[in-house]
Amino acid sequence: MSKNSESNGGKKFKTKKYEKELRKLQEELCKLQAWVKHKGLRAIIIFEGRDAAGKGGTIKALTERVSPRVFRLVALPAPSDREKSQMYIQRYLQHFPAAGEVVIFDRSWYNRAGVEYVMGFCTKEQHRDFLQLCPEFEKYIVNAGIHLIKVWLEVTDKEQKRRFEARIDDPLRQWKLSPMDLPSRGKWFEYSRARDLMLNATDTKWAPWHLLRSDDKKRARLNCINHILDSIPYKKAPREEVKLPKRSMKGAYDDESTLKGRRFVAQKY
């Protein structure tokens, strides 16, 4: 465990420094992407944590410079009536990676260990069975050659309260308030106990949890991307030299004049 694993420490990143460091890490993510495609690797990254812990912003920083065909985001809605009748893990399996893919789960099968358990959407027996079977299921994933990275974003009570209040007051953030957010705020310690039960049962040698302090969003995003880069060994993939071909003048004509009279978007800005 690193010296800084218990605290973000220090002052918050200034925007200019954050953007500079983020750019470096995103360049490395592009190298990782090329290596994943070159070697046909498969990886799953799971993001879990309390509401308003910063999962969305962290995932955005991770994915904004890479291909969505390689880094594929899965954020499933509440299960349909049909999905509720299926085996619990079934709707997640269909999204697992093929060769050359990294699948990012914005919440995952661990819904059963968190929101479903706390909010009473599953029975105590279903929760108990999940905690018992999940480590074996994840051992199967890892033994199949899939890199499994599990990140829990940990936000403090004070910071979660501040973020919820900001969402209520800011029209650009109000869409982030889900029907589960406000009820979850009143169940802080229920979620803490559910987290502890989950970690005790599923923090294994083959699929360990890594906790990410996320009160400082910028620092959390950088630390998370760095952790992912450290978790999947990669090298610079071979790449063919790219040359831009010259434009052919065969069949040339005035292709601007043919647009006259067409409807264009108003140039308001």
Image (spheres, grey):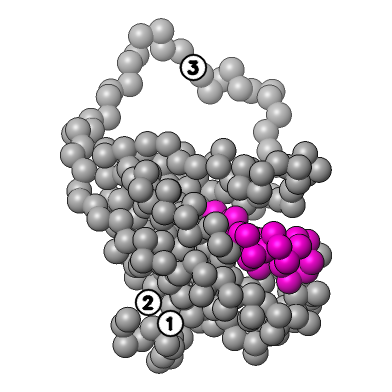
Of all residues shown, which one is farthest toward the top?
251
- Position of residue 189 relative to residue 112, above or below, is below
Is residue 113 on the magenta stretch?
yes
Query: Which residue is painted at 33% across and 16% down in the image?
Result: 248
200 with respect to 84 (left or right) = left
Picture coordinates of residue 104 (x, y %)?
50, 52
Picture coordinates of residue 43 (x, y %)?
40, 49
Count of residue discs: 3
Q: Secondary structure at mark 1?
A: loop
Q: Earlier in the sequence, mark 1 or mark 3?
A: 1
Q: Earlier in the sequence, mark 2 or mark 3?
A: 2
Magenta residues, start to end = 105-130
Residue at mark 1 to residue at mark 2: CA–CA distance: 7 Å
Query: Which residue is painted at 53% across and 58% down in the image?
Result: 134
* Depth order, front residue of 195/12: 195
Q: Amino acid at mark 1?
A: Phe
Picture coordinates of residue 36 (x, y %)?
31, 44
Disc on res. 202: none
- Label 3 belongs to which residue? 254
Q: Amino acid at mark 3?
A: Asp
Is residue 203 on the magenta stretch?
no
Disc on res. 13: 1
- Label 2 belongs to which residue? 17
Q: Secondary structure at mark 3?
A: loop
* Depth order, front residue of 186/82: 82
139 with respect to 194 (left or right) = left
- Position of residue 249 relative to residue 93, above or below, is above
Residue at mark 1 to residue at mark 3: CA–CA distance: 52 Å
Query: Which residue is painted at 46% across and 13% down in the image?
Result: 253
- Position of residue 22 relative to residue 164, above or below, is above
Is mark 1 in CB contact (under 8 Å) with mark 2?
A: yes
Majority secondary structure of magenta residues: helix
